[in-house]
Amino acid sequence: MATKEFPVDLMHATWFKSSKSGPNCDNCVEVAYVPGAVGVRDSKDKTGPALVFAPGDWHAFVAGARSGGLVRG
């Protein structure tokens, strides 16, 4: 798979945790949907690095996590 770099502004993104994380969970990942991308970061390091996925790649990752297996495209 080829990688493609593109600018994504996550500075003003609205980040959220899964509703299954619970109100006091500080050991989670947070997700932000922005135009053309999905950001993922560590909830303990809000100013640290974030992974950025293309929407289709993010949906494939979530589908694989839900099924507990590998999703092949």
Image (cartoon, rainbow, N blue to C red):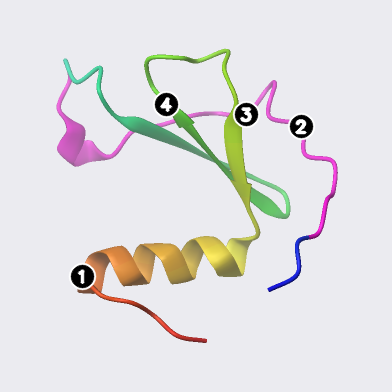
Residue extending farthest to the front is 1
Q: Secondary structure at mark 4?
A: strand
> What amino acid is found at the position of numbered circle 3 in the picture?
Ala
Q: Residue 38 in the image: x percent, y percent?
A: 59, 48
**Residue occupied by mark 2:** 9
Asked if residue 7 is positioned above or below residue 2 in the image, the reply reads above
Q: Secondary structure at mark 1?
A: loop
Q: Secondary structure at mark 2?
A: loop
- 52 horizontally vs 36: left or right: left
Location of residue 69 (image quadrant):
bottom left
Of marks 2 and 3, the one in the foreground: 2
The main secondary structure of the magenta stretch is: loop
C-beta proximity under 8 Å, tags 2 and 3: yes
Q: CA distance from mark 3 to mark 1?
A: 29 Å
Badge number at residue 68: 1
Q: CA distance from mark 2 to mark 1?
A: 31 Å
Of marks 3 and 4, the one in the foreground: 4
**Residue occupied by mark 4:** 42
> What amino acid is found at the position of numbered circle 4 in the picture?
Asp
Residue extending farthest to the bottom is 73
The quadrant in which the N terminus is found is bottom right
Badge number at residue 13: 3
> How many other residues sit within 10 Å of disc 4, few (<14), some (14-19) or many (≥20)?
some
> What amino acid is found at the position of numbered circle 1 in the picture?
Gly
> How many other residues sit within 10 Å of disc 3, few (<14), some (14-19) or many (≥20)?
few
Of marks 3 and 1, the one in the foreground: 1
C-beta proximity under 8 Å, tags 2 and 1: no
